[in-house]
Amino acid sequence: MTIDVRRVASMAKIRIEESELESYEAKMRAMLEMMEDMPETDGMYEELVEENAMVLRKDIVEPSLDRDALLSNAPEKNAGCFGVPKTV
């Protein structure tokens, strides 16, 4: 199994040094192998979903994250929101 760490890093907008590529590839491979070893559920949770499909959580106002802290790493900001390219 080959993992293109440079491509993953590019999509995630993170910088990885050349000397760290092998280490990250090994870590990613270990995560994928762990996921492959997970047991199948065989639908054991479907009954729970069907029984409680309309049970909703209470809408409770709670403190949220600070907007300035969230936007501190955004490459582009617009009116206090993330700036994204226009798509049609």
Image (cartoon, helix red, strand yellow):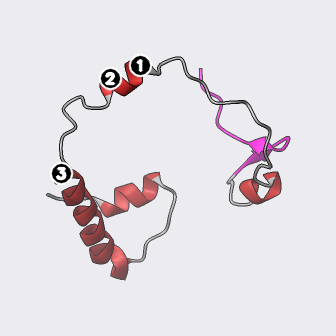
Segment tinted magenta in the rendering: 76-88
Q: Within the image, what quadrant is residue 60 found in?
A: top right
Cβ atoms under marks 3 and 1 closer than 8 Å: no
Rendered view: 64 above or below 87:
below
Residue 87 in magenta? yes
Q: Position of residue 13 (x, y in %)?
A: 52, 57
Q: Main secondary structure of the magenta part?
A: loop
Q: Which residue bears the numbered disc 3?
A: 36
Q: Which residue bears the numbered disc 2?
A: 47
Neighbourhood count class around disc 1 (C-alpha, 10 Å): few under 14, some 14–19, many 20 upward: few
Q: Is residue 48 left or right of residue 65?
A: left
Nearest the viewer among 5 and 52 is 52
State the residue at coordinates (33%, 71%). 24
Neighbourhood count class around disc 2 (C-alpha, 10 Å): few under 14, some 14–19, many 20 upward: few
Element at label 2: helix
Q: Quadrant of the C terminus?
A: top right
